């Protein structure tokens, strides 16, 4: 197995493994690497929905996304599709999956089936680096705060009318939950502090109004997405990418009009999140 860091702070490419044939010990090694690097790229895989799911189940229980279209072969595998005639994509904005859940998902495993000739990259940002590069006083202030996360405005009836990926998203009546999480979490795998707010699902600080929260959240989002905190990942068919929702944000770029992009996603359950001591 060969591991190459994608940047100094974020990401690793893991070559020389077949995700259809990994031991429990292999998974522990990959988990430890993921907790540290935030995202892993595993190229040259040949995965069916069933074999992708079997690999994911070695990491933990599966979280079935209640808003995405499942693939025909397996209801636990979500289809992430943009057809040539569709304008908006899924995931087109900085976000952390499932932060609106009381126990957010650990991470997702996205397998590339069809990639546009140009475009369709994914940006990743390290929330470890974003936190550590804030001033000491700011870090201290944030460490005592909590934030409210919601899916209502993204997946629920409150989402904007117009050109939404509606046919690809379902069950808006289920988007009724809000969750409160520490603004700075102790990563449950690595023990490192991580900034846990995100532009898509965080709506305000707990105990603050939205108006009071907006400017501070906007600053954190600008800071977290600075180039030195991010990488731009270029997909190839047959690559499986795993990201850790507790250590990263991601952003699916929508820069391939008239082209098709098809991925299969499996999401693994997480654990309750705690603040730093």
Image: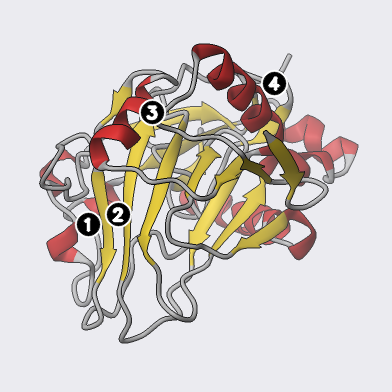
User: Residue 124 occupies which quadrant of the picture?
Assistant: bottom right
Q: Which residue is mark 4?
A: 190
Relative horizontal placement of residue 131, taking residue 236 as reference (left or right): right
Q: Disc count in the image?
A: 4
Q: Name the residue located 43 percent from the left edge and 39 percent from the top edge.
A: 108
Instruction: Quote the CA–CA distance across marks 1 and 2.
Output: 5 Å
Image coordinates for residue 148, horizontal then vertical, percent = 45, 37
Q: Is residue 208 visible?
A: no
Q: Which residue is mark 2?
A: 153
Q: Tell me the quarter of the image containing the N terminus.
A: top right
Secondary structure at numbered mark 2: helix
Badge 4: how crowded within 10 Å, few (<14), some, or many (20+)? Answer: some
Front residue (pair 43, 218): 43
Secondary structure at numbered mark 1: loop
Image coordinates for residue 18, horizontal then vertical, percent = 48, 35
Q: Which residue is mark 1?
A: 158
| Disc with the residue nearer the chain's start (3 vs 4) | 3
| Disc with the residue nearer the chain's start (1 vs 2) | 2
Instruction: Quote the CA–CA distance across marks 1 and 3.
Output: 32 Å
Q: Which residue is mark 3?
A: 56
Image coordinates for residue 197, horizontal then vertical, percent = 56, 42
Front residue (pair 14, 188): 14
Marks 1 and 2 close (CB-CB < 8 Å): yes
Front residue (pair 107, 117): 117
| Disc with the residue nearer the chain's start (2 vs 4) | 2
Marks 2 and 3 close (CB-CB < 8 Å): no
Give the vertical position of 255 relative to 2 (above or below).
Answer: below
Q: For the residues carrying marks 2 and 3, which lies nearer the camera in this image? A: 3
Relative horizontal placement of residue 60, taking residue 165 as reference (left or right): right
Relative horizontal placement of residue 258, taking residue 5 as reference (left or right): left
| Disc with the residue nearer the chain's start (1 vs 3) | 3
């Amino acid at each position: 197995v060969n591991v190459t860091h994608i940047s100094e702070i974020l990401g690793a490419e893991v070559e020389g493994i077949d995700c259809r044939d990994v031991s429990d010990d292999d998974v522990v090694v990959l988990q430890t690497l993921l907790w540290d690097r935030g995202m892993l790229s595993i190229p040259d895989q040949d995965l069916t929905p069933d074999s992708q799911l079997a690999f994911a189940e070695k990491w933990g229980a599966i979280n079935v996304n209640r808003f995405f279209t499942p693939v025909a072969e397996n209801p636990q595998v979500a289809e992430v599709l943009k057809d040539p005639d569709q304008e908006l994509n899924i995931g087109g904005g900085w976000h952390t999956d499932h932060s609106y859940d009381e126990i957010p998902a650990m991470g997702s495993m996205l397998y590339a089936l069809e990639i546009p000739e140009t475009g369709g990259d994914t940006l990743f940002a390290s929330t470890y680096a974003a936190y550590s590069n804030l001033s000491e006083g700011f870090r201290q202030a944030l460490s005592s705060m909590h934030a409210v996360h919601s899916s209502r405005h993204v997946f629920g009836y409150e989402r904007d009318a117009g050109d939404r990926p509606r046919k690809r998203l379902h069950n808006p009546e289920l988007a009724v939950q809000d969750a409160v999480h520490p603004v700075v979490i102790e990563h449950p795998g690595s023990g490192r502090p991580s900034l846990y707010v995100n532009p898509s699902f965080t709506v305000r600080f707990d105990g603050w109004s939205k108006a009071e929260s907006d400017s501070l959240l906007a600053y954190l989002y600008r800071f977290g997405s600075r180039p030195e905190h991010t990488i731009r990942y270029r997909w190839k068919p047959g690559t499986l990418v795993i990201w850790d929702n507790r250590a990263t944000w991601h952003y699916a770029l929508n820069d391939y009009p008239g082209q098709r992009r098809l991925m299969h996603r499996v999401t693994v359950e997480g654990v309750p999140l705690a603040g730093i001591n």
